[in-house]
Amino acid sequence: MARSTSEKEPGRIKQMWQVFQMTRRSDPHITWYLILAFLIPIAIAIVLSVFFGDNVIAWILYIVTGVMAGLLLVLVILGRRAERAAYSQIAGQPGAVGAVLKNGLRRSWIGNEEPIAFSPRTKDAVYRAVGRPGVVLIGEGPRSRTQPMLEKERVAVARLLPNVPLHLIYVGPDTDAVPLHKISGKLNRLPRKLTKAEVIQVEKRLTSVAKVKGFKIPGGIDPMRMRAPRPR
């Protein structure tokens, strides 16, 4: 058992080092952030041990707590910076929003990496996420081109679910657009209006309607005149 544990540790450390190297390429200040994140809790722990520590054991406990807090803070900052660096590498590419909806949302959200509307010519797309705040439509591309696409989908969703809150988000090159790495935070800050059960029902309703729309009747056949085959 001890041998298997020792074999796993180098892999984890190597993986963290690779994440750090990847992050540093797009975020040169990450090294200083991590150093400060590690040293500040230790400095606070030392100050607290001087003023409130009654003996050597208390001093040691304060310092150990500061070290553990520093390590935890380093992991948190590295994770967030690494996520931001990864998103910066795919920002502006078709399907970037889909990658965020697939990997970057909390469990309370239901998102799909496949767009619900797509322009083959411009590669602009509209994505949908369903959560406790309601239905969120996200346009990927310049606002001048995605706004009509979003409006069309907004009308369709509002007609199908008139009592469900609906939000629009633009992700693209515009100055007022939401950056790729802030999509998750933007969604989580929206006011919650639905229960978990209602979220599931809304998603099922939207999915079922999308499947019906995707069904194509062969040309030349009038569905009003179709008859069921007679049993033989």
Image (tube, rainbow, N blue to C red):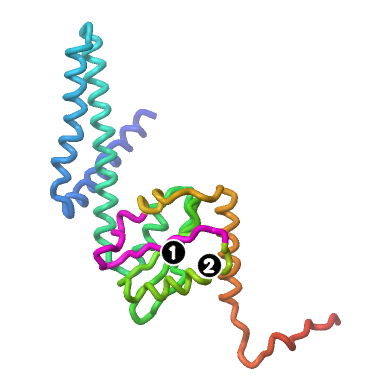
- Residue 229: x and y in percent read 79, 83
Residue at 22% from the left image edge and 44% from the top image edge: 17
Which kind of residue does numbered mark 1 sit on? Leu
Residue extent of the magenta highlight: 163-183
Alpha-carbon neighbours of circle 2 within 10 Å: few (<14), some, or many (≥20)?
Answer: some
**First of labels 1, 2 by sequence position:** 1
Q: Do the residues labelled 1 and 2 touch (CB within 8 Å)?
A: yes
Q: Let me know if residue 112 appears in the view.
A: no
Residue 137 placement: quadrant: bottom left
Magenta stretch contains residue 217: no
Report how far apart the C-alphas of labels 1 and 2 lie in the structure: 10 Å
Label 1 SS? strand
Residue 181 placement: quadrant: bottom left
Name the quadrant of the N terminus.
top left
- Residue 228: x and y in percent read 78, 82
Picture layout, residue 40 above or below residue 16? above
Alpha-carbon neighbours of circle 1 within 10 Å: few (<14), some, or many (≥20)?
Answer: many
Would residue 160 appear left or right of 72 to someone viewing this image?
right
Name the quadrant of the C terminus.
bottom right
Q: Which residue lies furthest to the bottom in this view?
A: 220
Circle 1 is placed at which residue position?
Answer: 137
Would residue 2 appear left or right of 222 to someone viewing this image?
left
Residue at 17% from the left image edge and 19% from the top image edge: 46
Circle 2 is placed at which residue position?
Answer: 157
Residue at 22% from the left image edge and 19% from the top image edge: 63
Return the residue nearer the eye: 115 or 183: 183
- Residue 28: x and y in percent read 13, 50
Residue at 27% from the left image edge and 63% from the top image edge: 176
Would residue 34 appear left or right of 228 to someone viewing this image?
left
Q: Residue 173 carries which label?
A: none
